[in-house]
Amino acid sequence: MIEYIRAILPNIQAFSSSLNKKAVFLNHPWCVINEDGVNEKLIFQKDGTLIMSQGGDVKTGKWEYLSNANSLLIDRGVDKKLYNQGFIDQSVMVLKLDRTTEDFIVLVNENQIPDLNLKSYLYKLIAQKNDLIQITDDNYNTVFVERLDPNDIYKVFTDAKVYSNSLESPEDGIYRSMSHGISFMVKDAVVIQIYYDEKYNLPDGSSFSIRQQKRNYFKIGDKIIHSTWKLENEEVFTIEHQRIIVENSEIVSCFRKNLFGKWKESN
């Protein structure tokens, strides 16, 4: 998580509030997030008292806002450290240790993010502030896609730009959206093909899913991405008015019924 914050910080600083707006952080329970999870809770009180709770054990320290430096001086009793603003809003604070670029602390407002899922919050922030569509796959990997239609905030189009979760160029490949029911192929950080992942139930109770180039009909090259049984090297399926021949999980021939009820090959 810390590495992700380090990567994304330059891209979210433009959306930051300021430490001089003390109401943003005063009297809120700020959980310190590290690689092992939460190890401490801090509360910055108006009178300059800093409440520090760790496992229910409470200590007090002091804090002071230094307006000339836009920094926080934090006195924990055992040490004093000066932190500069990295990012702050009502939910998240990133404070950088003075005169360093790598050493910082990340705090999450427990009232605003009760589950402390910081990454999920940042994904939504990035999508909203940059007018992007957040796409998360079955393995909870996330990319962002350029929104090309302002009237359809969830639709993905070909030629849309694609960004990794740290707003860099993603790897080429096929990405699947867990909530949109589509997949899309990315090459050189651009969507070049949309696929529709459709599920079909067979009369014997079995089912399979096909990654289709068109939503309403099959085309050669469509692939079976899931089935409830082990596919043979070659299979033939009849689904409503379409018949397909599948070899090694890929459709190699398509047929449709014509007006006379006869099967006619299509592409």
Image: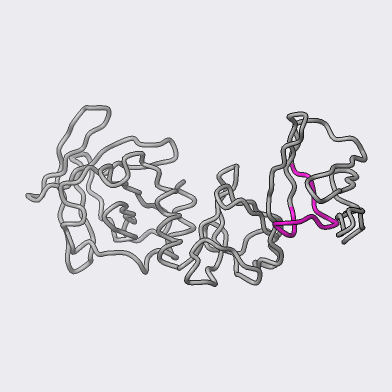
The residue closer to the viewer here, 204 or 135, is: 204
Of residues 43 and 228, the one drawn nearer to the viewer in this rendering: 228
At x 16% / y 51%, what residue is drawn? 26
For this orientation, the residue located farthest to the front is 260
Q: Is residue 214 magenta?
A: yes
The residue at the point 64 percent across, 51 percent down is 176
Asked if 80 appears above or below 217 in the picture, the reply is above
| Corner quadrant of residue 193 | bottom right
Residue 92: give x, y in percent of width and height. Answer: 32, 52
| Above/below status of 131 relative to 62 | below
What are the residue bounds of the magenta stretch?
212-225
Left or right of 111, for residue 184: right
| Count of marks placed on residues | 0
Residue 39 image position (x, y, % from top left):
33, 35
- Examine the rendered structure and indicate whether residue 77 appears above or below residue 205: below
The verdict on residue 137 being magenta is no
Residue 64 shown left or right of residue 7 in the figure: left
- Residue 143 drawn at (x, y percent): 56, 57
Q: Position of residue 140 (x, y in %)?
A: 55, 44
For residue 21, what is the image quadrant? Answer: bottom left
Of 82 and 92, nearer the camera is 92
